[in-house]
Image (cartoon, grey):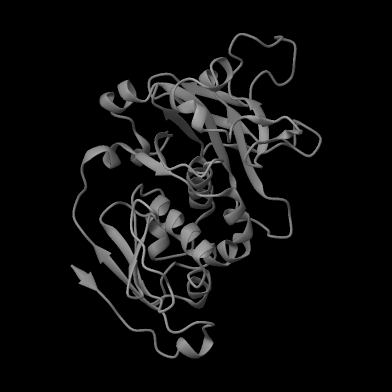
Amino acid sequence: MTNKQKLPGLCAMCVVGSLFLGFTAGSGYAGETSNKITANKISSNRIAANRLVANKLSSNKITANGLQANLDTSEILQTEDGREVYSYMISCALPAGKTIEADIPDAADTAPPDTLYSCKNGHCGFPGSIGLAEHWIDRALSPRGQRWVTACLLSRVNAYGVSMKISLRGDAPSLSVSPDEAAKYTLQEGAFYGNIFGDPEKALDWNACRGKNKLATPDAGDLKLRACTEPDRNDPSHTQCGFNYAGDCGAFGKLDPASVPTRACKTFESDEGTYSDCTAPAENGFSEASKTYREVITTYVKH
C-alpha cells in the first residue's frame, strides 16, 4: 500500500524545485539481504560533509505530519552527495519493504547498483533495508538509534569506492546471523561504533577497531578491498578512512597482558561473532573518561 501527500509551500523555501515525500510500505524481503549481507560504497568524506544536516535530521522525525517531509530533509536531498548519505541512513534505519519517496526535479536518473536509491524523471525512492531505527518515521531519532545508525553507516564506508557485499552483525534483532551467512562470510574485518549525530562543533565521534583476520591476514579474500579498520601509516591515531583508530578489537593473544588496554572491546559473543562494550579513544588515548558503546557492528567478508 502506498500513501503520498504533496508538501504545501515547500517550493518557495527550496534551492531547487519542489520536494514531495511519501512512504511506501511493502511486504517481506528475501535472499541475502534478509541476512543483513549488504553492499558498501559510501565515502567517509560525504558523511563528514553532511554531518550538520544529519544532526538536524536526527532531532526530528524523518517525515512531518505523517507523510510530509520536513525542510531539513529537503536540504539534504538537493545534492548528489546528500542523497547518497540520506540513502544509507534510510537503508540502515528502516526495514526492507518501506521506502521514502521524493520528487526532486534536478536529480539525475540513477538506480542500483550505481546507487542504493533510484531516481527517474525527478522521482526518487530511498528503500529501507536493515531496520535499526524504524521509530525515526514517527519521532526524533533516539540516542540509541543514533548510535546504531552511525555504526551501520561507518561499517558501509569503502576507502576504495568499491561496492561489495559484507556481513553486518551486532546485538540487535535485525542483525542476527544465519548459519548460511556465517559459513559464507568468515573473515572478521573489525567493528564500528560512535555517534555522528552529536554536536557538529565537536570532533566527529566515529570509531573503528581492527578484527582478528584483518590483523593476521589483511589481504586475504575480500579483506584486501576493505581498509577502514586499518591504521593510517601517516597518522596511526586514525584509520585509512579517517575514523578514530581504537586499536585491535580483541587481545588476539599477542599483546602484553600488563598493557592497558589490551583490547578495544570488552565483550565478544563467539556464537554470533560480535563485539560489544567497545571503547572510543579519548584525545590522549584510552582513559576512564573514554566512551564505551554497546551499539557496535562487527563486519565480516568472504574468503
Measured as percent of width and height from the top left, residue 220 is found at 48, 20
Q: Between residue 9 and residue 224, name the one nearer to us.
A: 224
**Does residue 133 show up?**
no
Question: Quick check: can you spot residue 220?
Answer: yes
Which quadrant would the N terminus be assigned to in this image? Answer: bottom left
Is residue 188 positioned above or below 192 on the image?
above
Q: Residue 145, how many percent across, how many down?
A: 48, 51
Left or right side of 132 for 235: right
Res 54 quadrant in image: bottom right
Direction from residue 36 to residue 291 in the image, left or right: right
Quarter of the image with the C terminus is: top left
Q: Quadrant of residue 269?
A: top left
Write the residue at 36% across / 49% down. 131
Name above or below for residue 198 compared with residue 189: below
x then y, percent, for residue 237:
74, 34
Residue 225, position as x, y percentages in the image: 50, 32
Front residue of 231 and 120? 120
Q: How many marks?
A: 0
| Residue furthest right in the image | 284
Is residue 195 shown left or right of residue 233?
A: left
Q: Residue at x 34, y 84 (%)?
A: 6
Which residue is pictured at 51% across the width and 36% down the height?
Answer: 296
Quadrant of the rendered image containing residue 67: bottom left
Residue occupying the point 59% across, 49% down: 44
Answer left or right for 123 relative to 146.
left
